[in-house]
Image (cartoon, coloured by chain):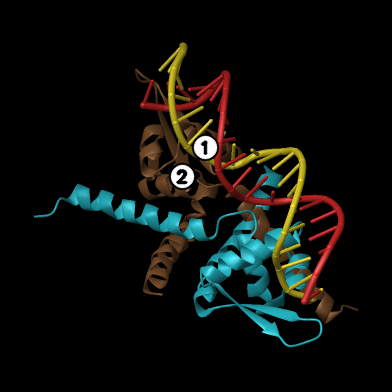
Chain colours: A cyan, B brown, C red, D yellow
Amino acid sequence: MTCQITDFKQEHKKEMRAVQDSMDVLNGKWKIAIISSICFYNQRRFSEILNDVEGISNRMLSKELKELEINKLITRTVLDTQPVTVHYQLTEHGLTLKTIINNLTEWGIAHRKKIIEG
Amino acid sequence: MTCQITDFKQEHKKEMRAVQDSMDVLNGKWKIAIISSICFYNQRRFSEILNDVEGISNRMLSKELKELEINKLITRTVLDTQPVTVHYQLTEHGLTLKTIINNLTEWGIAHRKKIIEG
DNA sequence: CAGGATCCTATACGATACTG
DNA sequence: CAGTATCGTATAGGATCCTG
């Protein structure tokens, strides 16, 4: 025998946890922007991302990229050039964020309008 | 005369800015979770949100709610009860985040699986 | 109940300089 | 080029107590 109201609450608890799980991975000032940069260009180099993401320092970029790699959202490929070149790409799993990125892009534009127009 | 490559870059710059705009509004450890709480229940009281969002302090909840109100994502309604009751709801504009919330919920579940399974 | 005030700490982040 | 190391600051956030 199940309780409707209890099920309802349990469901929301699950949802709340899921949302927090997402945000734990995407936290910080730069994660989404970095992913976006790689996502928009499919493949991107360290210095290119550094340019795409306005205001980020190399220190932070380095740190965030590591975390994203640990979370299996991106891959890091060192090319045997002189000097070294490094490519970052989204993994298959990272690519599943594409929808969210696109939504955030659209929403950002809409929000800017909303705030400016008042 | 327009340059294809320049247009391409400009377009990405715009997208990058839009994404950052979104994240500026949704930054911090709790914003999305708070919005989710209100979103899932349509309408929610201070203490209820405090319970929904695991780990948040009343200080932060208060602060974040204010920012969300300033950004016109939620409305605050004081009910004339004893003691005072306050309802928070998403504005029409805030409701446009519903898609993103849902995506983040689904993604959070998928990500947890991915990380646990390895 | 819905917060505000105060105090405190951790850490996120920036700036700069350095290296293979 | 793609980072690492070091240092310093700001602020995000927690804990606790207080109030209309």
Give left or right: position of B14 versus A29: right
Type of amino acid under label 1:
Leu
Q: Are marks 2 and 1 in contact (CB under 8 Å)?
A: yes
**Dividing the picture into quarters, in which one does residue A77 lie?**
bottom right
* Secondary structure at numbered mark 1: helix
Name the residue: 40% across, 66% down.
B112
Q: Which mark is residue B65?
A: 1
**Dividing the picture into quarters, in which one does residue B89 lie?**
top left
Give left or right: position of A29 versus B6: left
Give left or right: position of A10 versus A63: left
For disc 2, the chain is B
Instruction: State the image coordinates of residue D20 (x, y, percent, origin top left).
Output: 46, 11
Name the residue: 41% across, 42% down.
B55
The reply to whether residue A105 is in sight is no
The residue tagged 2 is B34
Q: Residues within 10 Å of mark 2 (few under 14, many from 20)?
A: many
Instruction: State the image coordinates of residue B85 (x, y, percent, origin top left).
Output: 38, 26
Q: Which mark is residue B88?
A: none
Name the residue: 64% across, 54% down.
A29
Give left or right: position of A53 versus B66: right
